[in-house]
Amino acid sequence: MRQLSYQATPVQEINDPVFREAGMRVLIKREDLNHPFVSGNKWWKLKYNLEEAQRQGHRTLLTFGGAYSNHIYATAAAARELGLESIGIIRGEETLPLNPVLTFARECGMQLHYVSRTAYRNKHEPEFITGLSRRFGDFYLIPEGGTNELAVKGIGEFAATLGDDFDYLCCAVGTGGTIAGLINGLKGARQIIGFPVLKGVEYLKGAIEKFLAYPYPNWQVNFNYHMGGFAKAPSQLKIFAEEFYQCHGIRLDLVYMAKLLYAVVHEAKSGKFEKGSTVLVLHSGGIP
Ligand SMILES: *Cc1c(COP(=O)(O)O)cnc(C)c1O
């Protein structure tokens, strides 16, 4: 059984006047540094899926994503490292030249297969999967965004390594798999706050609950920081990410991490975190 390489990651303090004035400490878990290509939460989401794929004797991983998907990028890199084949089912038409994400995926040996947006919506239908099997032969299927029970299990294992030197854990939310794993891993301790980066995703709460090992009450989802929707980056967000990098030396991608840190700063300014508390922010990776 082959495993991905893993680099231990630090927790750093973010020294910022905003947080001092709010009477709180903010730490950031630099899980973005755990692997050069399969970084952050994607490493943990893939961990048990990669084990299961190999245990079942599959030689190929197949997964789904948009043209800018971090999950496509991570899966392609993981497959290459473990000597597996990979197929990416990409939403929409091919646009040339390929963007950096898909260029990288191709360089990792991922076979890219484009499907129309309409067909893509049916990606979970048995007929669609059967069609893929007829076309590509045997594969281990990982859902869009990589979220399934095994992904949540991997994140849960990660959460258990975080120790207890914090009161709040803040994370970005896409499909909800990561926050679900964090909630399970912390087993009812501390407060977990997720910030979705998509607009109109009130269904996420239910999606997260589905993956919980127990109906833990110590979590919430704050829908106020999507900033226009997935991969939308208004100029105030770009300026924020640039200033954050100048002040703290930490790069933030505009899809996930810039929105998360922007949210934490604004929640701090409006006094949403208790005075004297410590907030741990999860740097879950991303492509800056
Ligand atoms: C994919 C991703 C997320 C979202 O994770 P979900 O499990 O889909 O909620 C958060 N941050 C980064 C950097 C990601 O790449």
Image: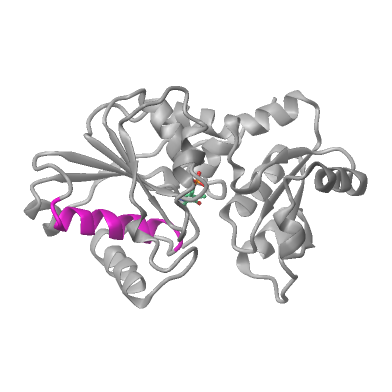
Residue at 60%, 43% (x, y): give it: 146
Residue at 70%, 43% (x, y): give it: 79
Residue 182 falls in image quadrant: top left
Q: Is residue 98 above or below residue 186?
A: below
Q: The magenta stretch spans which residues?
A: 255-271
The answer to whether residue 16 shows anywhere in this view is: no
Considering depth in this image, is 43 or 128 the residue closer to the camera? 128
- Residue 250 lies in magenta, yes or no? no
The quadrant of the picture occupied by the N terminus is: top right
Instruction: State the image coordinates of residue 23 (x, y, percent, origin top left).
Output: 8, 47
Residue at 64%, 48% (x, y): give it: 144
Task: Single out the residue that lies furthest toward the right.
Answer: 134
Q: Main secondary structure of the magenta part?
A: helix
Considering depth in this image, is 23 or 196 the residue closer to the camera? 196
Instruction: State the image coordinates of residue 199 (x, y, percent, origin top left).
Output: 45, 61
The answer to whether residue 56 shows anywhere in this view is: yes
Considering depth in this image, is 65 or 59 the residue closer to the camera? 65
- Residue 262 lies in magenta, yes or no? yes
Instruction: State the image coordinates of residue 135 (x, y, percent, origin top left).
Output: 91, 49
Residue 148 falls in image quadrant: top right
Instruction: State the image coordinates of residue 132 (x, y, percent, origin top left).
Output: 85, 47
In the image: residue 223, left or right of residue 115: left
Q: Is residue 105 above or below residue 49?
A: below
Count of marks overlaid on the render: 0
In the image: residue 127, left or right of residue 218: right
In the image: residue 153, left or right of residue 234: right
Q: How is the image coloured?
A: one colour
